[in-house]
Image: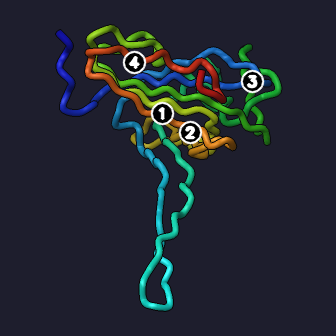
Amino acid sequence: MATAVPDAWTEFFLLGLTREVGGVTASEVQFAGITEDITGMEWGEKDIEGIALANGGRVTRKVPMTDESITFKVYPIDAELDGDGIVQNFHPQATDDTSVPIVVENKKERTKHKLVLLWSTGLPAAASTIPDSLEPAFRIQVINAYMTRYIPSFDGKISSAEMTFKWVPFQKDGTGNKREESTDGSAQLDAATTAVTAWN
């Protein structure tokens, strides 16, 4: 029998973050997150506006969907790319700096990212891993995202930072850049995409 679906997804989730480096997909880096540290989820707007007609009537004009973004609070302790640091995602170096001392210089370049967020009654080791059978789960996948904001802070007398990823809702061919998926545990989620720029 499947595990009961919770009334709400609270406490912990997994975040898998993958970069595309020179057209090559890098390894997924894992973050264990606290749900309340997701400080913003802007899923865009599909607005409309009324256009007045001479007879007093109205026709509806559909406004194109706006861009989407998500903001997380994180607690970086270094400048590595191993999940303890995040700044090299914001300022990608010509070659990833993984040798101590690590130096991250401001750069004009931008890197595309894939994000996988997973909530489940039985979290696996990685966000992209399919939860065990019979475990309810909720997953959000985003491709073609850019890290657009990185703001370090010492709020609460602890070193933290807010990072924002932003993406357009659709690719040039009209394909979506975000998916939301769920299961009540009676069937497993499909495998997560392994690409940063496409669904596969």
* Residue 3 to residue 8: above or below: above
Residue 118 image offset from top left, x and y in percent: 40, 24
Whichever of callouts 2 and 4 sits on the residue coming sooner in the sequence is 2
Q: SS class of the residue under badge 3?
A: strand
Disc 3 versus disc 1: distance between alpha carbons?
23 Å
Q: Which mark is residue 176?
A: 2
* Residue 164 to residue 120: above or below: below
Residue 159 relative to residue 196: left or right: left
Residue marked by disc 1: 179
Amino acid at the residue labelled 2: Gly
Whichever of callouts 3 and 1 sits on the residue coming sooner in the sequence is 3
Name which residue lies at 18% across and 32% down. 7
Q: Which of 101 and 111 is in front in this view?
A: 111
Q: Which mark is residue 67?
A: none
Residue marked by disc 3: 21
Residue marked by disc 4: 189
Disc 2 versus disc 3: distance between alpha carbons?
22 Å
Q: Badge 2 local density, few (<14 within 10 Å), some, or many (20+)?
A: some
Name which residue lies at 47% across and 56% down. 45
Residue 25 in which image quadrant: top right
